[in-house]
Structures are given as structure tokens and as C-alpha cells.
Amino acid sequence: MPTEYAWFLPTGQYGDGHKINAKVAERPPTVEYLSEVARAAEGAGFVNLLVPTGTHCMDGWVMSAAIAERTDKIKFCVAFRPGLMSPVLTAQQAATFDIITGGRLTVNVVTGSTAVDQKRYGDYLNHDERYARTDEFLDIVKSVWRGEGPVDHKGDLYEVEGAVIYAKPVNKPYPPIYLGASSDAGRRCGARHADVHMMWTGEVEEAAQDAEDMKKRAAEFGRADEITLGLRMHIVCRETKAEARRAAEAMIEGTDISNIQVWSDMRNKTESEGQRRMNALGARDSLWVTDTLWMGVNAVRAGAGATLVGTPDMVAGALREYVEAGCGTFILSGWPHLEEAEIFGREVMPLLKDTEPVVL
């Protein structure tokens, strides 16, 4: 099974640098710097860039359009939240991006975040209601993308009449859909719609169970062969194990205490099942879950908290275990994102040829 390796674009308010949650961004998220990261990822052999969403970061559509002009082949996995825009307008906007970039769009459907962030956007639906909305939203978006129009839809949350767009996506039948979820409601939604069902990284055994579970759920919709499990994780790779561990631990040393408190509140008051799983891994006696799996990032911020740490052979070996467990997509990141992308491309990617990496 071909394996996709993707990288992360740090568009958030803390930018990029050698430290996580620095009080002042060492490298602000400018178009110029993020374009450097994108080109480094492209040169390293990554095929896709995850561009995040939320009030803490730049708008993903606008930033991706700017950086697409400064790169050649790499795709953009643009994150967005159903419910903040009309499904037909979203379909039109995404199709336009896909056209002007020559088919370089994939989409990351983010159903929700912290309650704090949801309320900032004026979104007060609860966890399961948001997934019901995503399900209905994607029904409309996919129908419009496929050109099944004019589309009439009258559901619990959306009503459209005669929906059709002139701009049709280059990707057929539509841009690949990445959808992240660990809860039962989220898995049901992913089983119906996701081409890549994303989860935050846990232990290999858990990943194998998740991959099997998603295949079974997708089979109920006749989609068992259409869905892949993807994992989101960080990477720290150095020449020796000791150097890698020192580099990992240095990332969280001296983290701004006020930022830690903000992230801690978000992490501990979450409705996200994925975040609860991260919290459980990070609450063990040691932040080292295995010889390579480290939960230090989860100690200082919310979100994806697992990091693979080690030599090139150790990191490649750990990734290979996840591939063998049934994972076909990896969205990786590391601080600073520019240098870590280069290190991964130079030191780790050549060791992963047996995983059949997707190339552009």
C-alpha cells in the first residue's frame, strides 16, 4: 500500500522556532518564511502540507493561495470548519483553489475544537450536533463538486435549492477529504465521507485497532477500500539517540508559563476524544511511552502531543511499525519546521522506500 508523507505549515500566532509556545515568535508566520518551509518540505519529498484552522492562526485559504504561487508541486491540505460558511460557498471556494493550483488541493474537515474557540466563532452546537452538521454539510459539498446539480437539499441544518457552481474541481470526483475524529460520532462521519481518516498518534497497538475499526465502519457504506487511516505526529531526528532526546527536551524548556496555563485550560476542558487520549498518554509516570514515543509536547500545549524521537533508523523503524499496523498517511511536524523538514528528507525519507512513499 502506498504511503503518503505530509508536513505541517506553522501559521499560528506563535510562529515557528526552536521553542514551543515562546512568548514572542522567533520566526513570525509571514508569507516569505512559510514559503521557505513549504519549499523545504517539497524538496524533502513530502507531498502535502497541512494548513491549520482556528482563531489562533492565519486564514488557511488565503495563506495557501499565497504560498501556492511560490511552490511547484506540493499539495495543500487546507483545514476548515463546517458551519462557519455555506456548504455551496465552500464548494465554490475550494473548487476555485483547486483550479488555480492545477489540482493541488486536499481538504481537512475540522468539525470542532475547544469550546473556547467554537464560541469565538459564534458556534454553540455540542459535540455530536457538530458531527451531524458535518455529515449534512459534506453531503451537499460533494454533490455540488460532482456536478450532480442543480442540487436540492432540505435537512435538519441546511436547506439549499438549485445549488450548482460553474467552477468544478480538477480532482475527480472531488479533492481528497481528510477528516479527523476519535469519538464514535466522529468515526461514523469519517466512515461515510473521509478518504483519509486522521487521528492523533498513540501507541502502535491502538493505531492497529483504529485502522481495523475504521475499515469495518467504512464497509457498512461500501467504502472499505476507499478509506485510509492517517496519523498526526511530531518528529525529532538527530544523529544519536542522546542528541535527539536533548533536542526534544530543549523544545519545551523555558516555555512561557502563561501560555502553558491557557493551553492547559483548553486541554483539560476539552470535548475532544482525541485530546482525552493524548492526555491519558501524557499522564503516565514517564513522558516516554516507548523508546521513541515521547509526550513532552502534550505537557505544554493542546492538540497533537505525540513525538517520535531518535536516530534516523529509530524514527524510520517506528514509522514502519505504524505502516504495518494499517496507517497509510502521516502528517508530520517539528521545531523549527524548516530545518526538521530538511533533516527528515535527507536522513529518514531514504530509509522509508520499502513503505512505497507517494511521490509528486
Image (tube, helix red, strand yellow):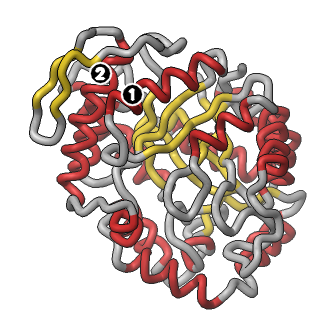
Asked if the residue under mark 2 is in contact with the one under mark 1, i.e. CB atoms within 8 Å, the reply is yes
Quadrant holding the N terminus: top right
Q: Amino acid at mark 1?
A: Ile
Horizontal and vertical percent position of residue 158: 18, 36
Residue 147 lies, in percent from the top left, at 34, 9
Q: Which residue is mark 1?
A: 227
Q: Is residue 321 left or right of residue 141?
A: right
Q: Nearer the viewer, residue 232 or 264?
A: 264
For the point 71% across and 45% down, which residue is it? 316
Residue 87 shown left or right of residue 79 in the figure: left
Quarter holding the C terminus is: top right
Picture quadrant of residue 19: bottom right
User: Does 62 sit left or right of 121 as displayed?
Assistant: right
Q: What amino acid is labelled 2 in the image?
A: Arg
Query: Circle 2 sits in a helix, a strand or a loop, which is it?
Result: loop
Q: Which mark is residue 337?
A: none
Q: Which residue appears at 74% of the width and 77% of the height?
A: 249
Crowd class of label 2 (few under 14; some 14 to 19; many from 20; radius 10 Å)? some
Cα separation between marks 1 and 2: 7 Å
Q: Secondary structure at mark 1?
A: loop
Question: Which residue sits furthest bottom?
Answer: 257
Of 165 and 360, the residue lying toward us = 165
Residue drawn at (71%, 61%) of the image: 309
User: Measured from the top left, where is residue 341 in percent x and y?
Assistant: 80, 47
Q: Dot 1, crowdedness within 10 Å: few (<14), some or many (≥20)? A: many
Tell me if residue 109 comes above or below residue 43 in the rendering.
Answer: below
**What residue is rendered at 56% in x and 74% in y?**
301
Q: Quadrant of residue 244?
A: bottom right
Residue corresponding to mark 2: 223
Asked if residue 97 lies left or right of residue 254, the reply is left
Q: Position of residue 286 (x, y in %)?
A: 56, 81
Picture layout, residue 169 above or below residue 234: above
